[in-house]
Image (cartoon, coloured by chain):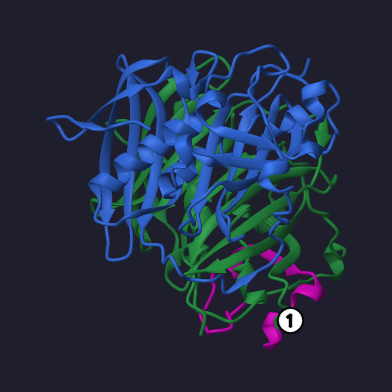
Chain colours: A green, B blue
């Protein structure tokens, strides 16, 4: 979604697009996807395996820069520190491990992975916002984000109390997901806390994502859950499956929340 | 467990203790705890809220340095980049958010948090190593790590296949846990994959921990679980409760694994 323009000193110039955000702020996952592309560009491997980011300041739309530092380039992985700056201020600080995923590998073992069950893509309901507190979400006009009818309670003022949103996500024009766009997918859904209680936006403090497999073409199924709200903070997890039913990405995040 | 010796240029000198490790390598959680102490020292808040680290090289015992960069010091949180170097090489790169935890706050809501059920501390079985593949674990002579009898199958060559270890952890001389030592607690247990299949050590690539509450004095209950083994990588989660039954810390990690 964003081009990285190489700069003389080894960094990249980027343009933050207001269309990929909430109100006038770029979405955190779209920023992490951008840093993932920068990390992949400076190393010798192809696929982000793990990315963790702390969100320092919320950048606005417009020009920004990405700097990278290759911490180690190894036979199996590269490890890269990435920083997004706007007007001289650090906005996102991330460390990213890049390696190789095998497109055909099946999981050797799994246990305690949540059930991907979601209503079929065509029976899910596309949401376009605004949020319960009335914020516009331009992002929802870029992607096709559909919720299972069982996750739609919050939109009518009746959250289920489970803290769980299930649905589907497609990129513009049905573009296939890759490891970097999966970093966006794990943070694209509305806050899972909307299914607990209404609030304003839920700003991410920290987001960690693991990419587990190369996704098949097509939309991805997403399960976004909140786990504990305590002291104005909430942790949320996200699991993403491709159309083959393979777990392709998972994430955890800690975010600020003020319940009304 | 480690003193941070301030250096002229704002960093810290540390001594990595071989007694806090596996074979001759310091344990990853003990390194993250050290970086947590450095992050807390440079900011104006008291408690680590979120820490994420990528493990670049495994340091040996002996001298090392920690450098920090305060990315932002805000009213509610500080965000600090931390780096552990040994002999000039980056070993661990972490970003840490430090804020304030309220000792008395009760969770406002929780859902999908695993059950802390564990046998009583005195009925759990202290383990001292070695690992199934015969590695000595000096760490287990420092802390008191006890497993629920239902988690002991691997020690007799009979993993249950659940990928789950439950038990208790105490610091030397029963010292109370604090937010930084909780960063150690989330990575102190043996790999949860030992309850799936034997392997050599399971080196952490990335570890993210959230501290959710100030722990009460006494041992902590730990639930360490593996979720999916795929392509020589496994993700593990860890939940830690204090003696009041309060969830005090949680973590996720991605680690390398080669099953025999």
Q: Provide the residue span drawn in magenta.
A: A129-158
Q: Name the residue that disc number 1 marks.
A: A153
Relative to A128, A7 lies left or right: left
Please tell me whether residue B208 belongs to the stretch shown in magenta.
Answer: no
Please tell me whether residue A152 belongs to the stretch shown in magenta.
Answer: yes
Task: Give whichever of A254, B137 is nearer the camera.
Answer: B137
Q: Can you give x and y, in whole percent of width and height, for residue B58 in the image? A: 47, 19
* Residue at x 72% of width, y 62% of height: B112
Quadrant containing the C terminus of chain B is top right
Is the residue marked by circle 1 packed among few (<14), some (14-19), or many (20+) residues within 10 Å?
Answer: some
Q: Can you give x and y, in whole percent of width and height, for residue A215 in the image? A: 74, 41
Q: Is residue A245 in sight in this rendering?
A: yes
* Residue at x 85% of width, y 44% of height: A244
Q: Can you give x and y, in whole percent of width and height, for residue A146 in the image? A: 74, 68
Chain bearing mark 1: A
In the picture, residue B193 is in which quadrant?
top right
Task: Give whichever of B148, A80 is nearer the camera.
Answer: B148
* Residue at x 63% of width, y 23% of height: B128
Quadrant containing the N terminus of chain B is top left
| Depicted A8 relative to depicted B128: above or below | below
């Amino acid at each position: 979604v964003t081009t990285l323009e190489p700069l003389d000193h080894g960094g990249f110039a980027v343009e933050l697009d207001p269309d990929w955000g909430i109100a006038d702020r770029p979405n955190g996952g779209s920023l992490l996807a951008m840093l993932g592309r920068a990390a992949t560009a400076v190393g010798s491997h192809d696929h982000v395996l793990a990315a963790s980011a702390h969100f320092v300041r919320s950048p606005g739309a417009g020009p920004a820069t990405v700097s990278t530092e290759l911490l180690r380039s190894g036979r199996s992985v590269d490890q890269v520190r990435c920083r997004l700056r706007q007007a001289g201020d650090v906005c996102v600080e991330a460390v990213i491990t890049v390696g190789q995923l095998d497109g055909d590998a099946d999981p050797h073992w799994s246990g305690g992975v949540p059930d991907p069950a979601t209503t079929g893509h065509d029976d899910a309901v596309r949401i376009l916002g605004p949020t319960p507190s009335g914020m516009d979400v331009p992002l929802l006009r870029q992607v096709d984000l559909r919720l299972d009818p069982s996750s739609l309670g919050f939109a009518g003022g009746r959250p289920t109390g489970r803290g769980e949103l299930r649905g589907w996500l497609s990129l513009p024009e049905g573009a296939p997901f890759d490891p970097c766009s999966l970093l966006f997918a794990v943070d694209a859904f509305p806050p899972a806390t909307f299914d607990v209680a209404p609030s304003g936006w839920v700003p991410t403090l920290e987001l960690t994502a693991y990419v587990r497999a190369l996704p098949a073409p097509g939309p991805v199924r997403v399960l976004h859950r909140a786990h504990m709200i305590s002291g104005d903070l909430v942790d949320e997890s996200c699991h993403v499956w491709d159309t083959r039913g393979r777990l392709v990405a998972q994430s955890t995040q800690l975010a600020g929340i003020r319940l009304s």
